[in-house]
Amino acid sequence: MSLLYPLRPYLLCILFAICSFHTATVYAVKQSVKTDSQEQSWVIQQIMQLQERSTRLEVLLQQQTQTSSDVKEAEKELQQLQLQLMELKEKLAAQADSQLRETKSYDNRISDINSFVNIWGVMLSLFGLIITIGAIFLGFSAKNRAIYEAKTAASKEAKTLIAKETELLVRDEQGRFEHLREQFEQQIKELQANFQSHNDLLIAQSYLDRAQEHEKDGKLDLALSISNELVDRFSISEFPEINGRVATALLNNARRTNSQGLTIDAIGIYDDIVRRFGSSSEPRLKESVVTALLNKAIIQDGLKHYTEAIGNYAEVICRNDASEDIVQKDSLQIAFALFSIGNIQKELEENDAAIASFDDIIRRFRVSEDTLLQNMVLMAIVHKGILQVVLKRSEDALDTLDMALKLFGNSTEPRQMERLAVALINKGKLLIELDKKDSACTAYDEVVKRFSDSENLEIRKHVAVALLNKGNLLIELGNTVGAIATYDEVVKRFGDSKDMELIGQLASALLNKGISQAKLKQNIESLNTFNEFINRFNDTTEPKMLKRLAQVILNKGLAQEELGLKDAAIFTYKEAVHRLRDSTDPEQIKLLIDGFNILGFKLLCRGKEELAKQNKIDAELTFKEALTHFNSALNHKQTGKASGIIMGNRAYALALLADTALAEKQFAEALRAEEYGGKFLYDATLKDLDIHPVDEDKPMRELVKRQWQLWSTEQSCYS
């Protein structure tokens, strides 16, 4: 509340006194100044209104707040009230003066009263003004003091609160700052570590790239040196990516070292990889360790260190089986390791164990949809079937091969189709062993039916093999015509091929066709077939093809003989001998020996014909030429078993040349030869004596008879 509230009694007393003085004055002059009664009433009314306004001001002062705006309004209204009071007093004074002028008859007492009232009025007005000013000053002072005290209290409390809040805020901010500082320090360390790791990774990769470039340029030693620098620089690293590059460098070095033939050193590098990273849980390093073990096992397998190889293959399988995430590559490693173990066991003739390894592949991956794994399964099935044949489990082998057809019979994948063709060919061979030759023909027909339209070279080779095998089988079955038709199909399908294997199959088909035609006495067709062969392969230098060519030429000579072209036949035999004369291949030498023997015998027969014509000189020259060829045949036979047929023919030539003693000695040795001696030689010689018989055959017949009796007696004694 304002400080004017305690002054309210004084203000009322002052107002009451003023009213009392005015009332006494009015009563004293009431009778004399009736004309001014209305004005006096108006003054009284104004005073009453002032009292009401004073009361309202007092109420307003009670309700006012300590805001500066309310105080100013109160001050303004008080000033207006003072002005009104002054106006009223001035009017009242004016009225008094007027009354003095109008009522000169008033006595001095009324004048004194009037003056007294005026003086007191002025004094009271001044006193009221002073009180009003003091009240206003005291109000302003009280307001300012209240505001000051409130501000002081609020400031003190605010300072205390602010101090506490500031302390808490500072403490919180310090804690948050420390936490952020620690985070920033950790992030800085991580960034520094990442930067260092990234920088080292770039350096390591640059080493690998440089080594690869040098390897491409053929500078293996420089590539090895750079990779070794990488390994030495980052041999101990906290970062898996760097360790991965180190493992890659070691793997590359092992491969390069092995390519130089340093297999033991390569194995040592693989061992180093396993030692460094064998216990790592990082996927890339685990993969490098398994790769090292696998490559090490492959090298040991090649070195025939089978026990160590099997151990490392088994470790590859074990590590991959222990992996929680079996991916395609891991599965392929398992399949390859199992297949390699099976092959080693097969090499060691541990066939049952090998079959078990192949069965493991089939069990693990037979339902796989991955093409590479399917190929491994099919290979395992084929090899299992082969081992079952070796173990004389023919029926089981047939079941195994049928399983391959069941699982992959509808496959269009080239490698699987190739292995299916092999499986069917093996099935045909197995059926032949089981004396199911008709079924074998069906198996070969199945190969042709399934794969005849394939453009894949390897599959075409298997089709050619199936056709050739079928043709040979038909000959065994007595179906020579069918065999010739089959050989014709080989020529038709593969006659224009440039592949050496297919050319080999084509050559075999033509050779067998010509021989088959000769058996059927189709001599002209046979001769044409042999000529076709010679025209196709006359310029060949490949050893196997040279052998076939010599066979064809010899058979051509036989065909010419059948056609009565004896001179042409002898020329053909000489051509065969000429082609094989300088050969060092055992198979070709065998043909050369046969060629010398055939040529010598044909010349011997021609000499007998000349004797029959009484051309003894030509006959003698022919016998000497024949003897030369028999000697050549025997000279090439020195490294092998002696042939009774060749020695018998030489004895015959000596006898016709009248060297009976040497002839008898030679025939005696012939009867005791390891090859074609004894009764076989005796019977063959008697048949030869009946070819173009002449009187000069008599000495030979007699010595043959004597030596046969001696040999028979010896055999009786031995028995």
Image (cartoon, rainbow, N blue to C red):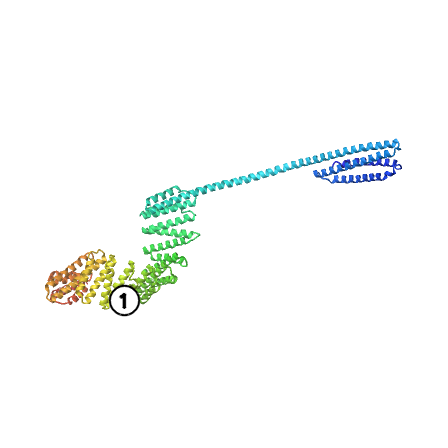
Name the image quarter holding residue 442. Answer: bottom left
Residue 21 is left or right of residue 578, and the answer is right
Name the quarter where the C terminus is drawn. Answer: bottom left
Figure check: 472 above or below 302: below
Instruction: Measuring from the top left, give residue 92's x and y in whole percent.
Output: 82, 36
Instruction: Measuring from the top left, give residue 240's x and y in whole percent.
Output: 43, 45
Q: Secondary structure at mark 1?
A: helix
Q: Residue furthest front?
A: 101
Q: Of the residues shown, which amino acid type is indicated by label 1?
A: Ile
**Of 605 and 489, which appears nearest the observer?**
489
Name the image quarter holding residue 553. Answer: bottom left
Q: What residue sits 79% from the left and 39% below the top?
A: 50
Name the quarter where the N terminus is drawn. Answer: top right
Q: What residue sits 42% from the left and 42% below the top?
A: 199
Residue 145 is left or right of residue 364, and the answer is right
Residue 197 is left or right of residue 509, and the answer is right
Pointer 1 residue: 484
Residue 215 is left or right of residue 643, and the answer is right
> Can residue 171 be seen at all in this image of the molecule?
yes
> Can residue 644 be seen at all in this image of the molecule?
no
